[in-house]
Image: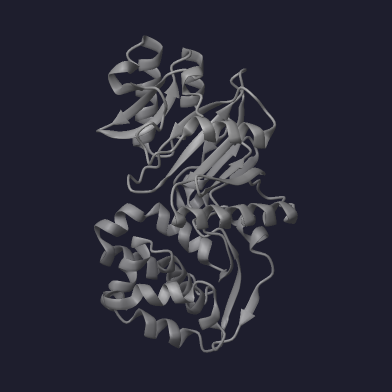
Amino acid sequence: MTTSSTHPSYRVYTCLGRRVLAMPTASRRLRLAGLARYQPFTFKRKLYRRLIWVCINTGLDRFFSRPATSPLADTFGFDFDRWLSQAQADLGAGGLIGIVYWPPQADRRRIYVHLFNTDLTPVGFVKVSLDTVNDGSLERETKALETLHTAALQQCRVPRVLSAGRFGGHTYLITEPIPVSAKPVAALVESFPRACVDEYAGHARRVSAQEITGLSWWAAYRSTLGNTDGGFHNALMGSMAHGLDIGNAHGDMGSANLVRDGETLWVYDWENYCDDAPLLADEIGFYMAINFTRILTDPKHELDRFCQRFLRDTPDLTPCSVLASLAFRAAWGLDDAILFLKHWGTRSH
């Protein structure tokens, strides 16, 4: 039995016809508190948040939203009220309010929920899966966060797991909220958090050339080759005659997954965590994320810049680790790395 009749009505906010967030209409303060959780890590997001903030304060937000009895009334048959009751039971807290966000990728079957208590204090951040692919991602992140908390990291902080469960046949993960006062890290290569990455990477472990094919991500990398291999695989295998150093990696290290609250660096979104990644996976992943748009626009030119930076200007980096880190990123299906593999034979030598 649902409780939609006892919950406040919602407003679903859109941008160019795409759903962005849904918030109760109960009060202006509540809507502003929910909007404050929208991280402005790109200029477009910053502009959109500012626009909605002005509209809420002037009462004009109805022009950017539509009314709804539930934030997910027409989405995948998901009973939001029943799920919210389950989340409250998990946390041992009643009267929680949920602000729903949709991911930027329209086809990604998941939602995000920011939970507030009646004082409008954030009490939890939730990822809710709506298919088996996202189930696996959230289960991997749950294990990663538990492992990282056991490690008692000093150089950064990761969200603590408050609860993890299943609803409607799929997985959800509730973590502690990142402070509202936290600010996005600048999208600059110089922002790479080296001390933090070195700490959670742990001690390097060497695997032999024969053991490389048994790494957890290797099969996924091989499946990306097909028509995208421009000679990259031969170069990779040739570089690994003496084996490969591996360690722990975030797997999706980019400025969008980093915020600072004073002196504290928060690192979140550990869904791609891997304990047998190449040692340079996160450094190269950070560089690729910063340059993602440029790589997609002109992959040949950006591949030359990449090779100049990591293979020519930095002689202390082994080609094996550099190439393996590209292979690792390609294993996750990331377009920038796959484009580099495709154009590998066109690079300047």
Residue at the image point whose x is 38% and y is 70% from the top: 307
User: In terms of depth relative to the viewer, which is nearer, 53 or 307?
Assistant: 53
Residue 145 seen in the current view: yes
Q: Say whether residue 246 is left or right of residue 128.
A: right
Residue 317 is situated, as x and y percent measured from the top left of the image, at 52, 73
- Is 172 drawn above or below residue 28 in the view shown? below
- Residue 225: quadrant of the picture: bottom left
Q: Say whether residue 141 is left or right of residue 9.
A: right
User: In terms of depth relative to the viewer, which is nearer, 256 or 193?
Assistant: 256
Residue 102 is situated, as x and y percent measured from the top left of the image, at 40, 38
Residue 180 is situated, as x and y percent measured from the top left of the image, at 57, 29
- Residue extending farthest to the top is 58
Q: Quadrant of the C terminus?
A: bottom left
Residue 37 is situated, as x and y percent measured from the top left of the image, at 50, 30
Residue 37 seen in the current view: no
- Residue 348: quadrant of the picture: bottom left
Residue at the image point whose x is 64% and y is 52% from the top: 145
- Is 6 drawn above or below residue 185 in the view shown? above
